[in-house]
Amino acid sequence: MFESLQLLWIEPPGRGLTLLSGLFSTLQIAFGAYALGLTIGLLGALGKLHGPAPLRWMLTTYTTLIRAVPELVLILLLYYAGTSALNNLLESLGFNPIDISGLVAGIVVLGFVQGAYSTEVMRAAMLAVPRGQTEAALAYGMSRTQSIYRILIPAMIPFALPGLANLWLIVTKDTALLAVVGFFELASATKTAAGSTRNYLLFYSAAAVIYLCVTLMSNVVFGWVEKRYRRGQATA
Amino acid sequence: MDWSWLPEYSDKLISGFWLTIQLLVICSSLGFLLAVPVGLVQVTGPRYLSMIARGFCTVVRGTPLLIQLWLIYYGVGELFPGIEGIRESFLWPVLRAAFPYAVLAFTLSVAGYVGEVMRGAFSGVPKGELEAARAMGMSPFKVLWRIWLPRAVQNVFPTLAGEVVLTLKATPLAATITIYELFGRSTEVRQDTFLVYEPLLLVAGIYVLLTGIIVTIFSWLENRIPKPSVA
């Protein structure tokens, strides 16, 4: 038992370093995808609430389809469709086709999926901001954009935070799906380590503990952020 | 777009479709059943049971389902061959197949997520209703069966539809442990025909359709049960 525990140590023959670098790429992909998702979500929510009708239809199709198809299928579809579309574009512009790194592809694919969920969270949060607040901003003579980033976005953050915290937890866990496509992150690092040492139970338990730690620490951080943003707000 | 492969592989795809439905129905039902005690003990149970249930929900919700599935299939599955005489026992065919492991992993996952929902649902039922039931002379089990559970389920019914959709979207993970459900079949077609998009688009369409059906069934059921009173 103790001999096999040594396999988790940093120095060879331990595979600790592999797991740690897997964790590092998992976190990189998760951060990138989350940021991309938030950007898409913010623009998508604004488009859904204030955009012209064709844009609204497109966004509704986007959020409905993405949320109805399993993430694993989406990852495969977007990865193949995305890379070949990009290479077609590059070729038509006269450039050589490029090999897209797993990191960038993972971020873009997961970010696109996250965007659909973020759009819905942000849309609900924007609707929860009393109309009078943005109307007051317009009455003060702020432009439409000013009223959005000075009033609407700061006022909606407390409403959006619980949903956004949940999305962060989802994206950290969804990075594991990239292992199926063969990207390097924590789940695939674990799979390699478990396969080469034939200690499946040990390594998958270790990975589960690592993911759990990420989740628990994120909960602490989000709890703190939420408390900060709810300052001065009437409690229900 | 090339769809000429479709007739040749339709039998395989249909069998994969039924396997997906089986996984979905079995795991959602078992998971919901398990979620009731998991939610209940957190509200009313003794301290040690409630701590176990809370820990279970945290672990299930805090780790990726893929890792749970691999942990159960490769990790726990690795222990069985070491047991003396197990290869000769009647259990061996069950322990060697992948399907039971997938059912176990998905059921536990549903129980963890829905257990958390049920915890909120049970604690949301007004105390007065339970006290009234007790005052009528109902036994604790009768209170649960006639008042507490129906009222709790009624309050969170729309959420349960979402959980079933999430379970449907989790079933493709079973393909990673050699279960040829719908997604696994599409992978097989892709490997045979070298087509990249068509099989994926087909199964994506089927999943959208299934999601639509689940949402329709649940909203039909929702209209048939009385609306919860607004407290």
Image (cartoon, coloured by chain):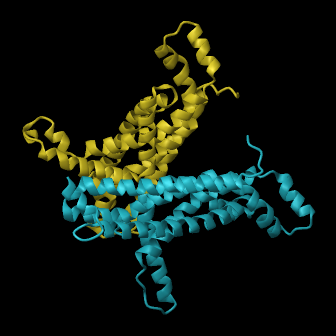
Residue B97, picture quadrant: top left
Q: Is residue B146 above or below residue B6?
A: above
* Residue under the point 45% across and 59% down: A174
Q: In this view, does B45 lie to the left or right of A140?
A: left
Residue closest to the eye, B9 or A139: A139
> B156 or B37: which is nearer to us?
B37
Q: Can residue B164 be seen at all in this image of the molecule?
A: yes
Is B83 on the left-hand or right-hand side of B27? left
Number of numbered tags placed on the structure image? 0
Farthest-out residue, top: B137
Residue A172 in the image: state x and y as whole percent: 47, 60
Which residue appears at 44% of the width and 74% of the height? A103
Return the residue nearer the eye: B79 or A206: A206
Q: Is residue B203 left or right of residue B151?
A: left
Identify whether A60 is placed above or below A96. Answer: above
Of all chains in the rendering, the one displayed in cyan is A
Colour of chain B in the image = yellow
Residue B86 placement: quadrant: top left
Residue A192 horizontal/vertical position (percent): 27, 66
The percent coordinates of residue B101 (x first, y second) are 27, 44
Q: Quadrant of the C terminus of chain A?
A: top right
Residue B103 left/right relative to B117: left
